[in-house]
Each structure stands twice: as C-alpha cells, then as structure tokens.
Image (cartoon, helix red, strand yellow):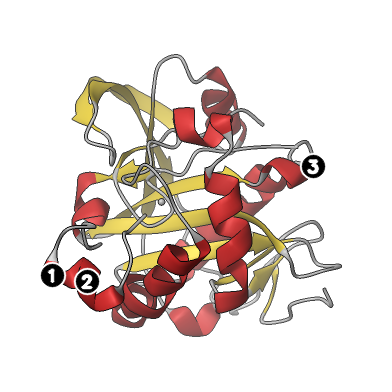
Amino acid sequence: MLKASLLPLRSDRVVLRAMRREDAGAYAAGTSDPSVREYAHLPEPEYTEESVLALIEGPIKEGLASGDLAVLTMTVPSTDEFAGSLVLFGPTGTSIEVGFWVHPDYRGRGLSADALALAHDFARRSGFTTVTARTAPKNSASQRTLDRSGYLRSGSAPGTTPAGESMDLLHYRRPLEPPNPSGSTDLRENAVGQGDGSVSEPVTTAEARDQLPNPGSRDAQTHRAPHQQQNAAPTGRSTDRPPD
C-alpha cells in the first residue's frame, strides 16, 4: 500500500507530489502532444481541463487515499508548476508498476530519470521491493531511460495498452534496496520548493485502467468526465513513454 504521508518528495531538479486541481489545465494540454498520444497509450482519445478535474476529485483522490493508485505530478522546484505525470499502480504483493510522461515544455532536462528515482524511494518506503514497467519495442527512448534507471529487461509478451490496443510489450523490473533503518534518504522529502525536454510515456496497465470510469459509464457521469494516464496518468498496461 502506497503511503501518501510520504509525499511530497524532492530532488534538486524535480518534485513529486500529489496532483492538484491547478494541474488540470496543463495536464490536459500535455496529453494533446503528438508524442504523448503516440507513446502513452492513454485510455481516452481526448482530455479537457474539466475531465481532468473530475479525475482529480474522483479516482485519483480515491486511489491515493486507498494506497493502490498514485497519479502524481512532476514539478520543477523553482515554480511548482506541472511538468509531467508519473503513476504508480497495479500493486501485486510487494511489486508495483510505474508509468510517466513529461510535458513538452519541460523536455530535455532529465526530469523523467529524477522522477523515477523519487518514485523508487516512495515505493520502497511504502513496503514494495520491486517496480515494474512495460514499453513498446520501438520506444527506444523509454528503454534508454529505464536502462539508466537500473531496470532489467525480463522478456517480452503480448499485452493490451490502456487504449485497448494489443501489441507486444517489453517487460522491465527494478529491485529496490531495503529502506534505510535510520529513516534517512538521499532525497529531500516533504519540502516542495517555491516553486529535462523530455517526454516519457505514462506507464499503463489494464488493472489501472479498470479503476477509472469510462466516458459512457454511470461512474463517468457521476464524475462528469472521462478518465485517463501509461502505466501512467491514471491507468493501463504498458510501460511506454514518449522520447526524452
């Protein structure tokens, strides 16, 4: 179970925090980017500020409270503005999956790798021992980021993306070191600053997707909006990400 009390987490270049209402517009704008559309395999064809607000107040808030879904915002310490999205979802035993993407305005700064490091710390301190990811074979940028972040390729297998697309996916896993008994960490937490181009696809999995309402469902009408994120923005089964 993910421990929301550990948030926010911070490094020199990126802050990882819970998603807020003020992130909705930038999140929606980021999902319209061609690279995000191609590689993130988002479950919905379009996101608007209103639909993302409904997600924030509904499935995203509920998932973080229950500890089985964390749709998190990446920000830069100097501004605290939305720079990308990272999702942890689909916990199974002591393993959890990750997905992520970076807003076009913030690519090329190395944010995805830094955010992954923070996500590993978050998962480790929440009791998980392994983080997994999946990506399309053609997504070499995602593969490079996962390689640099200590992930090991464990094979490939057919899978279904959050968008409902069937394809072969490369599977990755990263063992996590045990938490430091002293409770200290290399990452500064719970201190969002006052506020690299890189795009990483949200990691997605079918389980995460199922936790969000479909646009035509009764749940979607209750939230007044469709749902969303690659192993990521909230949802799906694949660890793809757009190029950094």
> Is 18 placed left or right of 221 in the picture?
right
> Is 225 placed left or right of 25 in the picture?
left
Distance, label 1 to label 3, CA atoms, is: 41 Å
Quadrant of the frame with the N terminus: bottom left
Q: Is residue 179 among what the camera can see?
A: yes
Judging by the rendered image, the residue that carries numbered circle 1 is: 218
Judging by the rendered image, the residue that carries numbered circle 2 is: 221
Tag 1's secondary structure? helix
Residue 32 image-quadrant placement = top right
Quadrant of the frame with the C terminus: top right
**Which is nearer the eye, 235 or 54?**
54
Question: Hey, what amino acid is under mark 3?
Answer: Arg
**Which is nearer the eye, 148 or 101?**
101
Q: Position of residue 26 (x, y in %)?
A: 63, 59
Question: Hey, what amino acid is under mark 1?
Answer: Arg
Mark 2 or 3: the one toward you: 2
Q: Are marks 2 and 1 in contact (CB under 8 Å)?
A: yes
Tag 2's secondary structure? helix
Distance, label 2 to label 1, CA atoms, is: 5 Å
Badge 3: how crowded within 10 Å, few (<14), some, or many (20+)? some
Q: Which mark is residue 109?
A: 3
